[in-house]
Amino acid sequence: MHSGNQRFPSLANRLARIVTVVVFLSSWSAFSQEPRPNVLLILIDNHSFFELSCHGHARLKTPRIDELASESVDFVNFHAPPFCSPSRGALLTGRYALRLGIHNTIGGVSILHKDESTLANYLKGGGYTTAIFGKWHLGMSYPYHPMERGFDDVFVHGGGGIGQLEDFYGNRHMNATWDYNGRPEKSEGFSSDVLFDRAAAFIEGHREQPFFCFLSTPATHTPYEAEPKAMERIKKRGVEASDGDLKLYSMIENIDENVGDLMDRLDALELREKTIVIFATDQGVNDRGAPEPRFKGKQRSSHPVAYDEKHAVTCMIRYPPLTKAGRNEAVTGMVDLAPTILDLCGIPRPSSLDGRSLRPLFGESRQWDDDRTLIVQCPRGRVRKRWDNGAVKTQRWRLVGGDLLYDIGEDPGQSTNVADKHPQVVSELTGAYDKFWESLLHTDTLLSRHIIGSSEAPSTRLNGMDWYRGGSPWHQLHLKRQRQNGVWAVSVARAGKYRFELRWYPREAPTAIGAIGASVRVGKEFAYVDTIPEAPNVVLELELAQGDYDMETAFKLPKEAEQERSWGAYFVHVDYEGKE
């Protein structure tokens, strides 16, 4: 769960983040005298643009989201990074994901750098009460947990999906255990139902003050698990599909029902006119469910996640005082949501943001005044490379990988490279990309180190999803199937003695390691101890100096097992024990 499962962030730590934002707001002499709108941001995981009946899906019925779309500006040319962590990082900061050091969902490059401020930080600094319900996927150890990122109320699962390595062991969508403000809490019911109910209670409890509610469902990410009531309705309609698709459809239709209930709750609380409602999804999922997918081949020959079918996502915004309902085809993106919300809430926009406010598109105007350029890049690995899975987008053009140019108006499937016919366009878009690439900080600067031994978090839990070198386990199934090793990047906050508890399985699922020895290395400091194979954990101690280090662990198997091969502890609890 949270950093050590044994503490709440100190008041000093929370105040430190608030002070950062207050300093930023110091140039703003006073908040607007107008009532500030509430913000309800609903983000659905791994949900295709086309998996709504209003967007053309042939089998699904989503009447309540369709209704919301009919009341909203429905952005139908809206683009996000093609994977979860980069997309969420861009959403919450208004900055391109590579600026944040995020370009994968595991491997130490899925963590939002501690120096970044989030939308929750800005809104909290502007007097909002903030909450997150559901999926985070931007780091769970100190100081990356959402409790340290501006959220007052936190109810989340670990990792990028139910049942991933960082999540509570054995979790399913039904009756899951969540991280509730740093403590495990068991729920009853299907994940989306639980989260929408929590969000509704939060909204009702804070209806008299401005709130930011970030409702981020783990559905429709795998594992697909049938929601019983929705599945029954779907089968009664006679929908024919694979078992996996039927489960997926039930998850979507369950979300639709919950969205409708939550909109009804806003109406009952007389909050419709006072609340910005944003409904979005985090990645394109290769046009899954589209009547006619853009790309009809099996796989792109190069830069496979740099095309619109992986970037184009749902985004609809309803704010009755300003939004004129209808479809909008202007090129827009996930980096635009944070500046849009700040604009509508009357909070000054930081100069470091890459996105722009969507407010000019809310009324009669349906296009930008200029030829807007948007950059989407997700290398999908630990090392970023120039143009790797990168694209520059304008209203008409897509430049992919630096040498593949597509005219979207003539070729929405991006199948015919016209770079040779339009060298000036290639030059202009390359220039925009070069400016972006050259502005990125060095990767060493962007490395997110896990801070151990701080006074705010003397106990920290690390897991193998965050190894920044070596193996990259990400699912609980890997505990049985793969024995890997890797390296964490850590920062020792205080000199002194540290206790390391090494485990193969997490504490909630104690399992014999089967090792005859175990070791831990932090920088040049090393400790080894003989163990008994039946032990579920091993404890070692090290005396450490303050500073930045690599940290690695190893279990040694008996000689007769797999040629004495060693593997790393997938879970390590680090406790600061003070100075001698």
Image (tube, rainbow, N blue to C red):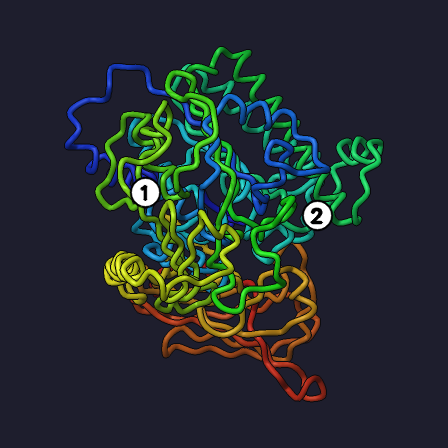
Q: Disc 1 residue type?
A: Gly
Q: Is residue 373 left or right of residue 222?
A: left
Seen at 51% across and 43% down, the residue is 313
Mark 2 surroundings: few (<14), some (14-19) or many (≥20) residues within 10 A: many
Residue receiving disc 1 = 355
Q: Secondary structure at mark 1?
A: loop
Question: In 3D space, how far apart are the residues under numbered discs 1 and 2 (Cα atoms)?
Answer: 33 Å
Q: Name the foreground residue: 434 vs 527.
A: 434
Seen at 75% across and 49% down, the residue is 244
Outermost residue toward the front in this view: 421
Residue 160, x across and y down, in percent: 55, 52
Residue 225, placed above or below residue 422: above
Residue 377, x across and y down, in percent: 40, 58
Quadrant hosting residue 420: bottom left
* Contact check, label 1 and label 2, Cβ < 8 Å: no
Q: Secondary structure at mark 2?
A: loop
Residue 342, x across and y down, in percent: 31, 31
Residue 143, placed above or below residue 477: above
| Residue 84 in view, yes or no | no
Q: Name the foreground residue: 396 vs 37.
A: 396
* Label number found at residue 224: 2
Count of labels shown?
A: 2
Seen at 39% across and 57% down, the residue is 391
Residue 485, placed above or below residue 133: below
Label 1 or label 2, whichever lies nearer to me, is: 1
Residue 1, x across and y down, in percent: 54, 49
